[in-house]
Image (tube, rainbow, N blue to C red):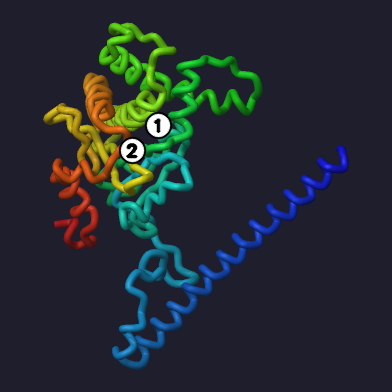
Amino acid sequence: MKPSQLSDACQCSKACQCIKEVLNHGNMEFVEAIRREQQLLETTNSENDSEKSRLPETGYIKQLGRLGETLQQSPKTVVLACSDARVPVLDLFQRRANEVFEIQLEGNVASTECLGSISYAVEHLPKIEGIVVLGHTGCGAITAAVDQYLSPQLEATTVEGSIMSLIRTIIPSVDIAASVLAMNSPSTQGTVLRDALDRRKLIGTATFVNAAAMAWKVQAFVRGLRRNIPVWYGVYDLASCRILHADLDRRDGSLLFGLGDAPHVTELNEVAQILVMYLQKMNHFDAAKFSTNGHNLQTTAAWEKLSMGDTASAT
């Protein structure tokens, strides 16, 4: 190893060690926060109610139990999301620990392993009432799949081969998006000419089609389980922090706030068409333009139900 490479390796090792210590310290702070909350709770219970105002509104003990205790899992929904650090699943739904069964894989791909996790949640966690497949704008996996579609490359290494397994799963959604884009492009005259496709629009369209397609796949899988529960999908827009889905009722190129029902496989072309129409009018996913369409009331009602307490949910 050259001296410069050795120096770089040492610097990398120090940086990694620093991050490790940051994570360790974070866990210590987490435990200490629970300990302080538990101590405060015990003091309040033993003295008077005047201290209740000091208790945290969203404490850890209610979510995770006291130190030394192990609560049962009690999530009300499963979320299959992309493993992107910019997509804070619990925060964007305003949920807390033990309320969401999270599954994350690049490209929110419904792989065999993810379906196995969904099967476990549906079959063994009785409070599960719905499943969400959540894509997001700016997805690296979608971008990689689009680039592979436009300029196919052979697999060169084992690492690239593992990435390609995800890309191959996403390619059918890219193919649908490309076909619909070609139908709406005068230059291609209904034929998919890859060099003539707008890469940006293809990425945007494929992102929604892929989320919808994976939701359809999950819905078909869940129908074979002992408990058949609804599946929804949406795309989290990194810029506006809103979840969006294609309006399959009006089919006029509109996007709606919130989650949409998992479409049938025959509706995936319609999802692509709606996105193509939308992107013909808009340069980007402008949140201000969504307000005229309003919220999806069915989705809102479903999340309100999921947000209720155990007693209200059981009635």
Labels 1 and 2: the sequence-earlier one: 1
Residue kind at label 1, given as amino acid type: Ala
Horizontal relation, residue 121 to residue 35: left or right: left
Q: Indicate which disc residue 110 carries.
A: 1
Would you identify the image quadrant in which residue 27 lies?
Answer: bottom right
Residue drawn at point x = 27 percent, y = 12 percent: 183
Residue kind at label 2, given as amino acid type: Val
Q: Label 1: how many residues lie within 10 Å, few (<14), some (14-19) or many (20+)?
A: many
- Report if the CB atoms under discs 1 and 2 are less than 8 Å apart: yes
Q: Could you tell me which quadrant the C terminus lies in?
A: bottom left
Looking at this rendering, what residue extends furthest in the bottom direction?
47
Would you identify the image quadrant in which residue 18 lies?
Answer: bottom right
State the residue in front, 297 or 275.
275
Horizontal relation, residue 15 to residue 172: left or right: right
Residue drawn at point x = 42 percent, y = 37 percent: 138
What percent of the width, then of the height, locates residue 102?
A: 40, 47
Horizontal relation, residue 166 to residue 292: left or right: right
Q: CA distance from mark 1 to mark 2?
A: 9 Å
Task: State the residue position of label 2.
Answer: 133
Answer yes or no: is residue 155 visible: yes
